[in-house]
Image: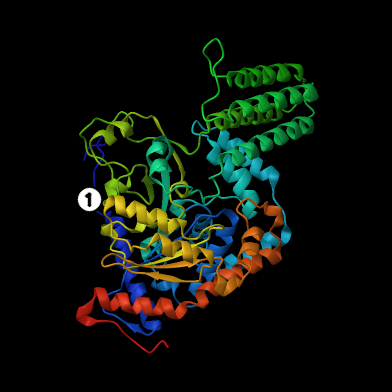
Amino acid sequence: MGSSEVSVIPGLQKEEKAAVERRRLHVLKALKKLRIEADEAPVVAVLGSGGGLRAHIACLGVLSEMKEQGLLDAVTYLAGVSGSTWAISSLYTNDGDMEALEADLKHRFTRQEWDLAKSLQKTIQAARSENYSLTDFWAYMVISKQTRELPESHLSNMKKPVEEGTLPYPIFAAIDNDLQPSWQEARAPGLWGSALGNTEVIREYIFDQLRNLTLKGLWRRAVANAKSIGHLLFARLLRLQESSQGEHPPPEDEGGEPEHTWLTEMLENWTRTSLEKQEQPHEDPERKGSLSNFMDFVKKTGICASKWEWGTTHNFLYKHKMGSHYVAQTDLELLGSSDPPTSASQSAGITGGIRDKIMSSRKHLHLVDAGLAINTPFPLVLPPTREVHLILSFDFSAGDPFETIRATTDYCRRHKIPFPQVEEAELDLWSKAPASCYILKGETGPVVMHFPLFNIDACGGDIEAWSDTYDTFKLADTYTLDVVVLLLALAKKNVRENKKKILRELMNVAGLYYPKDSARSCCLA
């Protein structure tokens, strides 16, 4: 195959097939330890929803208890969106050592520290890239503050345990934000469970951070005229923020240039002038470079905030010839249209026809949190090619824990994908006083076990109080060690109290999908 070609791979990639096949051996051993005898391993997927820091901590609790109960080793796929992905990535970077992960989590929240200087340094470094966007700012200046650690793991860190099958095969997702109208219109009404759902709150937070960082940074550096420049920049940032409040981009000046050009020009002129004024024989040249990089970071972040630009990355199909072969799925799945991902190439959003024109005409893609569409990764494990038999869906939403079920039901109905049907009236009834586990079954397709985090079994009549304590937009400073430990314990309890139900469904799907040598188990009652 020539270097200019991009190949299409129907179905799953050979790498995923090989990893899943190796994982089957581990799953069979795990089932045997759980006293479930089967000649073939059923495919089980665990899903973690979004929910910011709450989802991060609760997902760690779920994974830890599943490991403790011997259930995690029976899982083939592990998928998440938003906050859950922070926990899932940690599982792989720590080789599945949940005890070490818990100890590290508690240590981080005992210290109540956040290394602002290091996080800012990482953000400034990222701003030097052509593809810098608010995603970089969010990762280093928000997520690192929430989790008390810098997000430095990569998909490549997961390669060894995944290829060897010692840990479940991970699937992460992103939404193509340039195709936002199609998926936003298709999603369930009011479904914004992701921590990134409240645009205005986030935009205001970003501008506040920029103002604080800029003013503090200028005074700390003792730059000439820092005070007056700082106030000018503060005012300009406020103007930029106000112009970006509406749904439309900031208005253009009379010259036709976007309004944010004042920020570019002002910072460039100020940086150049300031450095000239500070030109002294004994001055460290690195200090000047650092100042320039800092101001470039402020400029780029302000512009990205005004344009609401997230997840900028090069489009490898840019200007690729129409009708050529296209690449299939990677471990990061791009879901950007209303088409169901029934094959690997469709999961990548590359299916032929007009969609190819859209993909090849854009120099950059803008990938955002998949939780903005459906706040749990059901679409990633529903393609028939993955042959998932049992889905354990852990919902960490602070609101209605069945919004994800509604959205997925609608998604599957539109795309003719088998999914258990539940009447809306029944979902409404459940949402008023959710239990800890619901088992959903259809005539075909996977069995779904849905576990709301806040439920009457674990929280009694205090569900609202629990939700308020762990609100998605609670400041990280409110998460003391005691608060973290309570949430971990709650998430663990939900797994532990439903272990028998999980084992029963494991046994059922093993016997249902492999009736020739049906699964056998001891009595679970």
Is residue 437 found left or right of 100 in the rendered image? Answer: left
* Most distant residue in the top direction: 255
Quarter of the image where one finds residue 261: top right
Question: Can residue 97 be seen in this snapshot?
Answer: no
Q: How is the image coloured?
A: rainbow
**Number of numbered discs:** 1
Quarter of the image where one finds residue 443: bottom left
- Residue 241 drawn above or below residue 168: above
Question: Can residue 38 be seen in this snapshot?
Answer: yes
Percent from the top left, x then y, of residue 135?
53, 41
Percent from the top left, x then y, of residue 233?
70, 24
Quarter of the image where one finds residue 58: bottom right
Give the residue at x 44% y 81%.
500
* Element on which disc 1 rests: loop
Give the residue at x 70% y 66%.
482
Give the residue at x 48% y 57%.
49
Is residue 404 found left or right of 211 in the rendered image? Answer: left
Q: Residues within 10 Å of mark 1 (few under 14, many from 20)?
A: some
Percent from the top left, x then y, of residue 522?
37, 89
Q: Circle 1 sits on which residue?
A: 10
Give the residue at x 23% y 76%.
514
Percent from the top left, x then y, of residue 244?
58, 28
Q: Quadrant of the C terminus?
A: bottom left
Q: Quadrant of the N terminus?
A: top left
- Residue 287 drawn above or below residue 196: above
- Residue 473 drawn above or below residue 125: below
Q: Out of 158 and 28, give the one closest to the viewer.
A: 28
Is residue 69 found left or right of 118 in the rendered image? Answer: left
Three-letter code for the amino acid on which mark 1 is drawn: Pro
